[in-house]
Amino acid sequence: MESSEQTASVAAKVKVLNRNGLHARPSSVLAETALRFSDTVLTIRRGDLVVDAKSIMELLLLEAQCGTELTLTAEGPQAETAIRTLRDLFEREFDLAL
Amino acid sequence: MRKFQGIPISPGVAIAEAFRRESETGPPPARRIEPEEVHGELERLAGAVEGAREELDAMAFGSGLAEAVRSIAASHREFLSDPTLLGEVERSVREDRWAANYAVALVFGRWIEKFKALEDEFFRQRYVDLLDLERRVRRHLRGTRQVRTPTPERPAVLIGRELTPSEAADLDRRSVVGFATEMGGSTSHTAIIAKSLGIPAVCGLGRLVDTIPAGTILIVDGEAGLLVVEPDESTLQHYRDRKKLLDRRFRILRRMAEIPAETLDGWPVGVHANIEFPFEVEQAVRNGADGIGLFRTEFLYAEHHAVPEEEEHYAAYREALDRLHGRPLVVRTFDFGADKFAREIDMVPEANPNLGCRSIRYSFAHPEVFRVQLRAILRASADGRVSLMFPMISSVSEIRRARRILEQVTEELRQDGVSLGAELPVGAMVEIPSASVAANLLAREVEFFSIGTNDLTQYTLAVDRSNERVASLFRPSNPAILWLLQHIATEADRAGIQVSICGEMGSERAYTLLLLGLGIRHFSVAPAAVPLVKRVIRVVTRRKAAEITARALELATPEEVDAYLEEQADKLLPDV
């Protein structure tokens, strides 16, 4: 009898550093990156609004401006890696600062 | 006479009759489908989405379209691949059994309302993009080809509720000389398109279409965001004069495209363009560029997750050369960091990417990637006047190492019997302080310098210009930068090599004067800035420029330098 797998749930707080906030370009980078973790559920919360990190449209609804704090949550086999990668994206301003 | 204050979205003055644009087709009828029709309907939907996607791809990468139109098409395309959005439409067809066009209208309509309810203007304006996309998908479902926005018979100012980006891009500029809409905002994509196409426009005027009969004389003041309805004589005259002034300025700059850039005393200066994509060559040439002084090649890496093939590189260089019709092309090798390239998940992120493994360092660390690019550039050199430059050079060792690799690759190609150009001049981007200070040593190792003033200023002043807290410290007019530039120019001259400027500094008229005075005779700027730079060059003699520069070099602060240069620029160029 197999024991059921524990799906890890990992969370992290991030801050939007981009000058123009999480607009179309960074949202697109974020969604594209999140989509690579196909077996992990990724959500982002601002206050009591929770959105799917894999959807550009939902990310835009966050209206996350520069300085906004968000909470990333990942559930699934790649939760740790996913959180690390996404948090890193926020810190690097989605590579759009150059 | 009535005046309406709206939001300025594109500068310029338009004086013409009103042409009313009636509302677009409303929502389709709410039609349910039978269970057995679901499969077919989903297929039709997939076909329409695919068609819309292809159309957007063509716009995103097509030639002859403004940069703004292209990037907006690219973002629309991304919205279209959003799994949530498409998923909801599919569910609406499959589970609720709505006909595809109604499902699209329903789901998009819901999302449009969500965005309209947002508080932040910037994010709120995305609803217009969704509207644009909805119309596009529904048009594909209908199977009709793209229809042009209705065209007035005489030059007119278009007024309507709102204009989607596609509609703005599609306007026939011979007949629509300006537009004014009830809705819209300055951050909308429509605004960006209007600006890039040079169509004076105002938006956010509120309800007014109903109060303006077709044919009424209107004035659009794109700078002030004003719409004047049935202007009185003095207002009309005021705007006619203003329009004359603006048109004159535009004509002067327009003419620059056709004549060579030389100083007032006949000293020829090269004005080239910086581009990111091959299709931009067209705009550069149209604006009178003598060639491409900087071809950024990162786009070949940005979209992919694997290394781009040699053929892709070669095709891009060939395309640029074909459009240049014999003009020169300077290709810069990969200039990004490891973090941008392929977004490899497992890599440990660098604490300081700007000072890290990027550009030439990245190329050295990934020789297989480097060689592919070098091979492609070498092959392209057989098809036109190609030069190669290496970015982020900090020492002579790097140039020597890069040249060694280049020689190896050249030898490989020769042995394979591939035809190469007779020569491939090799240059260095001078953008790091060490390369600037030791310019004399570096000048002996290359055929030309290209000064990247943006990065040079950042590194020298230790300022991150994208950091709002310190961005105001980023001043190319800082005397230290001026002295460095003078040093680089002097050493290049001594070594007998060409030096050009490829940073933004070259395109600001005050700095163009200064750089001319330093003896710089090659500029590479954004395509749109080519006419202005040419104009600046033509109004001044070499001696006058040198005088201005000598005086500027005596000043102690960036503020004093800027004030002095602005004063000189105003005297020489009162109308630009």
Image (cartoon, rainbow, N blue to C red):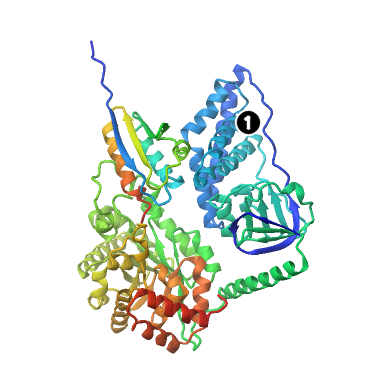
The reply to whether residue B177 is visible in this rendering is: no
Asked whether B214 or B269 is in front, the reply is B214
Rendering coords of residue B50 (x, y %)? 54, 37
What residue is at 49 percent from the left and 87 percent from the top? B266
Q: Quadrant of the C terminus of chain B?
A: bottom right
B531 left or right of B339 in image: right
What residue is at 66 percent from the left and 48 percent from the top? B206
Rendering coords of residue B103 (x, y %)? 60, 28
Instruction: Please identify the residue farthest to the top as the structure is shown.
Output: A1
Asked whether B377 or B127 is in front, the reply is B127
What residue is at 56 percent from the left and 73 percent from the top? B257
Q: Quadrant of residue B555?
A: bottom left
Rendering coords of residue A56 (x, y %)? 45, 39
Quick check: B576 above or below B6? below
Chain of the residue where label 1 is placed in the rendered structure: B
Q: Residues within 10 Å of mark 1 (few under 14, many from 20)?
A: many
B270 left or right of B11 in image: left
Quick check: A65 above or below B256? above
Q: Indicate the amino acid at tag 1.
A: Asn
The reply to whether residue B356 is visible in this rendering is: yes
Secondary structure under badge 1?
helix
Quick check: A4 above or below B63? above
Quick check: B55 above or below B390? above
B32 left or right of B122 in image: right
Q: Quadrant of residue B400?
A: bottom left
Disc 1 target residue: B101
